[in-house]
Image (spheres, rainbow, N blue to C red):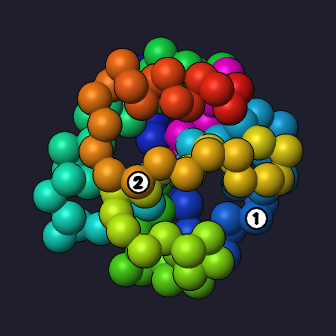
């Protein structure tokens, strides 16, 4: 099973923008109910797309700089980055099939 690792403001550019593979970043917070609902879906995608996609999570309460930089106003927000650019920004909970389809467009 692929691990969904945390990313912070200080290593975001290195881990996400300079990644050779596309990266899905799950912007979340511990107090967010929908974030807890989407977490297992994100984990399943990380496992299914291992090797094609890196999946990271960022706590917006602990990392406000990056959340502000990408205008994350609602959580959960799932952002797909490819080649150092934001490709897709998905706000709110989605069923796995829909999320997989939306992420696949950016791969």
Is residue 5 visible in the rendered image? The answer is: no
* Residue at the image position 67 percent from the left and 22 percent from the top: 52
In magenta stretch: residue 45: no
- Residues shaded magenta: 52-56
Q: Which residue is drawn at 30% across and 67% down?
A: 29
Residue 24, given in percent of the width and then of the height, sits at: 57, 43
Instruction: Quadrant for the C terminus, please.
Output: top right
Q: Which residue is drawn at 68% across and 32% down?
A: 106
* Precedes in sequence: disc 2 or disc 1: 1
Identify the residue at image location x=31%, y=37%: 94
Image position, residue 54 (x, y; %):
61, 36
Dot in front, 2 or 1:
2
Q: Position of residue 6 (x, y in %)?
A: 48, 56
Q: Which image quarter is the N terminus in?
A: top left
Residue in front for this viewpoint, 2 or 28? 28
Residue that carries the numbered disc 2 in the rendered image? 91
Residue 5 or residue 83, whichever sits in front: 83
Side (left or right) of 73 relative to 70: left
Category of crowding for the residue at label 1, using alpha-carbon neighbours closer than 10 angstroms: few (below 14), some (14–19), many (at least 20): some
Dot 2: element: strand
Q: Residue 13 carries which label?
A: 1
């Amino acid at each position: 099973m692929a691990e969904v690792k945390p990313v912070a403001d200080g290593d975001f550019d290195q881990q996400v923008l300079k990644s050779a593979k596309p990266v899905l970043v799950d912007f979340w917070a511990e107090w967010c109910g929908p974030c807890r609902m989407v977490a297992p879906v994100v984990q399943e995608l990380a496992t299914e797309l291992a090797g094609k996609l890196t999946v990271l999570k960022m706590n917006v309460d602990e990392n406000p700089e990056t959340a502000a930089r990408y205008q994350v106003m609602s959580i959960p927000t799932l952002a797909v980055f490819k080649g150092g650019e934001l490709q897709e920004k998905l706000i709110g909970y989605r069923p796995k099939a829909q999320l997989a389809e939306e992420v696949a467009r950016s791969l």
